[in-house]
Image (cartoon, coloured by chain):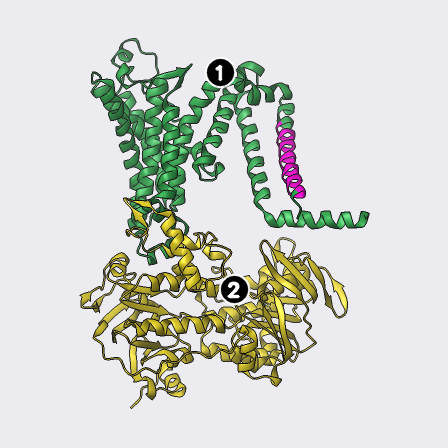
Chain colours: A yellow, B green
Amino acid sequence: MEHITKRFPGVLASDDISISVGEGEVLALVGENGAGKTTLMNILMGLYQSDEGRILINDREVHFRGPEDAFRAGLGMVHQTYMLVHNMTVLENVALGYKNAWKHVRVDLDAVRTRIEEISTRYGLSVNPDAYVWQLSVGEQQRVELVKTLCLGARFLILDEPTSALTPQETDELIALLKNMTKELSIIFISHKLQEVKALSSKVTILRHGKVVFSGNTDDYSSQEIAAKMTGHEIVLPKNRASMPDGEEALGIDGITVMSDMGTKALDNFSLSVRSGEIVGLAGVSGNGQRELAEAINGLRPVESGRIVLLGKEIQNRSAHDVIQAGMGYIPEERNTEGIVPSFSIMENLALKDITTEKFSSHGIVKKDEEEKNAIRLVEGFDIRCPGIATAAGTLSGGNIQKVILAREIDRKPEFLVAVYPTRGLDMGAVEFIHQRLLAIRESGIGILLISEELDEIMNLSDRIAVIYKGSVQKILNRDEATKERLGILMAGVKEE
Amino acid sequence: MTRGFRIAFRAAIILIAIVAAVVFASAILWLIGADASRTFYIICIEPLTKMLHISEVLIRAIPLCIIALGISAAYRSGIINIGAEGQMAMGLLAFTGVALAFPDLPRPLLLPLALIASMIGGGIWGYIPGILRAKLNVSELLSTVMLNYIAAQFYSLCLRTIFLDPNERIDGTGNPQSMRFTENVWLDRITGRLHYGIIIAIVLAVLIYVLLWKTTVGFRMRASGSGARAARYAGISVGFYAALSMAISGAFAGLAGGVELAGVHRRAIEGITNNYGFSGVVVALFGGLHPAGIIPASFFFGLMIYGATLAPSKVGVPANIVQVMQGIIIIVIVTAQMVLSNTYFQDRVWRRYQRIMKKEA
């Protein structure tokens, strides 16, 4: 790709970008959220048209009018959000795009099956063609996406943040798989996790504000150097070094049992206690009851037995509204669907929880100027980068959406905060910002329950670390007792003597 | 993209849409051997030439507007109310009940009382599917349609039994109808049959705008509608607002019935609902679910409905054919709207235009 420029209304998304990838090479495209990585790849796939510049494949200039053209040229992309039909089987999903198997009105499913088997043995991607997509874990769904793309004959893979939704184990598997594939394929992968970049790529290109700020061989630079080039300044993730807090118990969870959506016990006699001014990190592989725990605390899921006490008040089985009124702050897992109303403006989202309070309304009429003042103040205070406070929140990048949520939750002055995967999928700059804020809240004497599967995050921030496994607490460690290895073993369900 | 290009693009799309609508509609008229240009004149222009005609268009636009306003409130809260037909029928019944029960109350008392009754009647009929959806997650598409059937039959039954005009039993026109209401429940007329319901419709439009965009209740309704999950996580009782919005929506449909009785018919007869409940859904969507769009949209639909009644006598085109033509026109307009709001398409045309210009240069 040479001299690619793309303008969107009000933004220059790509500014004279040139990149090149050789056969069998892996190029890591890194940069903060909103740096223009995805836009660039969408141009390459023919989803957008560039305003200037050209694309060359094997020295021949190509024009893609749509993704179909790109497929034909041997390009394949796995998007950040998977494009699979949930109530169809893996086989049917692959058949959807695999035009070779379309015989007039009939689809030759056997041919598709053979093709899937061929691909999965060649690249070591095991998938069950007859499983329904909704039955698969996120990691398995991603394998399906890979198989689907490869079945179409891709010789050149584009992966948009392939690991952002994966557990650490799945991430390791994926990297091993991709390494194996580079024998036959070229890959561009978008990421902001630097371990992966180091582990997988041969070349790295860094984008910032739509410009290439750096290109080089991965091996010549350390993770720190790349991180610094990415954000434009040194990144040092803050650490919690304060002494053990000795405040009163802020949140007490006493032997609760909670059902999952499937009707099985997601939490089984789960107990945990968090003091004021303390961060308790809850480590665990996702799917061990974390979601249900956060929902039960916040009044979104019934508690079958046991008690949840917030500052002396029982809050189990109260409505979400009551729990919020009792002083609970919540950063939910799915920031796009649970944290914000995507079509609402930033301004409205910042007032979402408090619209009926005197601050934002009187006698049922919304005080628009208060809403605006509040938004302007928070956008500035939390460095939310947006075209304006009337912008729909759903159009922001992940990091900025998270800042909107964080701003709302912190500014409400909660008595306690539950933060679920607060930095998932965010770039280093945003992670740094959010970690600093969480530590600042802790300093002000508020207890935080931090649910995460990033062990670095948990170890950097927590005073105590609890490990959850199959719905109960496996073990609680003090910060200085925890090592990555020890936590990893506990998360895998091995009991310590 | 230049400003000139954008204007030219819009103009071109609108022109193409008009031409397409005319061509399709003419083809149908040609098939049945009618005079196409004369028919168009009768349907689109003639109703606007005389005050009498305009007032007839307006009295059809009034119930459409009121119903569509209610539907937009429900739609914005995440519920698709296709039960306005039934809610309107219940409003008619409640209004008739009050009007016949207290014929001698003074007008300043009786008229508001009857109108409020019609709102309550429709409101309850809307609240039922709302609460079913909120508590038991029953699809409102299913429940509202079923309630339409029930309401229609119940209306028919009442008209033939408790509300039946005693004189009807004696001289029997064959059409079941109630006694003519006393003047104490009449809405005055401005000109022709045009009544003061038009003021009510405009006031309601302002009310809906204020409710949805200026109040905390509206804020929460819209939040529930556009992001139910996030709304729930923010402590908003999504179910409550679903039920509330349906009650409001039903009350509007019921009131549309009440206004129709007080202003136009002044007695309960068959066929007052006249599919307004269904057309109201189209008007609401057509008007962009916003009062400022619903008012012109309801006028446009009123024009179409009235045009269909003129065509048979003036040019001998059956009303059914006019409805077919209207269907075509609506589809073409909706398509044109979609094309106009598709910025990607505009972008593509712009690029092609540039390429052509380059070649020529």
Q: Position of residue A187 (x, y in %)?
A: 63, 74
B268 displayed left or right of B98:
right
Location of residue A265 with respect to B134 vertically, above or below: below
Label 1: chain letter: B
Residue A165 position (above or below residue B337): below
Residue at point 27%, 44% (across, down) = A363
Query: Which quadrant would the C terminus of chain A be assigned to in this image?
Result: bottom left
Circle 1: element type? helix
Front one among B239 and A239: A239
In this picture, is A241 found above or below B133? below
In x, y percent, where is residue A348?
40, 52
B235 within the magenta span: no
Q: Name the residue under label 2.
A: A82
Amino acid type of the residue tagged 1 in the rendering: Met
- Whether residue A51 is visible here, answered yes or no, is yes
Observer-side mark, 2 or 1, equals 1
Q: Residue at x 62, y 22 (%)?
A: B32
Residue with the mark numbered 1: B51
